[in-house]
Amino acid sequence: MQSDFCYTMIKILREQEEVMLYANVFDISPEEQNKVVSFLNSEFERESLNYPGKAPSFNPTAAFWAAKICYFAAQLILYRKDEPSSLEILFESYEEALDHSAHLSADLCLRFLPKMIFQLKAIDPEDLIIEHLEAILRKFPLSGVECLEEMDESEIEDLLEEDCYSGL
């Protein structure tokens, strides 16, 4: 029986702002996915009480996608021996609508990527993973504002029209 490695890491990341991994496992079962989504939904509900304006609804697809990105990034930072040939698969683009709901739901986990990128740059500033993670953060600027040197305001103008998002 597989343990809930992804769920455990995401829970510790959210509650203690630390990465804790117990095994080099990239498989996430449907049951574990449901557990991660349920946890992130409760985190979203708790956080949204403090959002300025009316918070959008929780987007489980975006939240789980972001959790996988963080989980895979942590796995590669801690356990990688060689450069994986499957970076495009592990760090797949978010293909759904990029609305306020997706941005804020993904931010539950993506807000931790800048610190992971910082660690990667300390280890190897030429690491290909950095490029993939920064590309993700460019699409989710709320999460990446801490580490992105350049941000095209025209890409986020429609997001800033929403009171909740612009207040954050």
Image: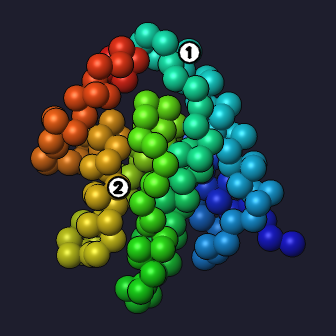
In the rendered image, which residue does mark 2 sit on? 136
Residue 108 in picture, x, y percent from top left: 50, 39
Q: Which numbered dot is residue 160?
A: none
Amino acid residing under circle 2: Ile
Look at the picture and state if 23 lies above or below 30. Answer: below
Q: Which residue is drawn at 20% across and 48% down?
A: 148
Asked which secondary structure carries label 2, the reply is helix
The answer to whether any part of residue 15 appears in the image is no
How far, Cα to Cα, is label 2 from label 1?
27 Å
Number of other residues with Cα within 10 Å of mark 2, as a class: few under 14, some 14 to 19, many 20 or more: many
What residue would you read off at disc 1? Answer: 49
Left or right: residue 69 compared with residue 153: right
Contact, mark 2 vs mark 1 (Cβ under 8 Å): no
Looking at the picture, how far across and down is residue 98, in whole percent?
A: 41, 41
- Tell me the kind of residue under disc 1: Leu
At x 44% / y 66%, what residue is drawn?
91
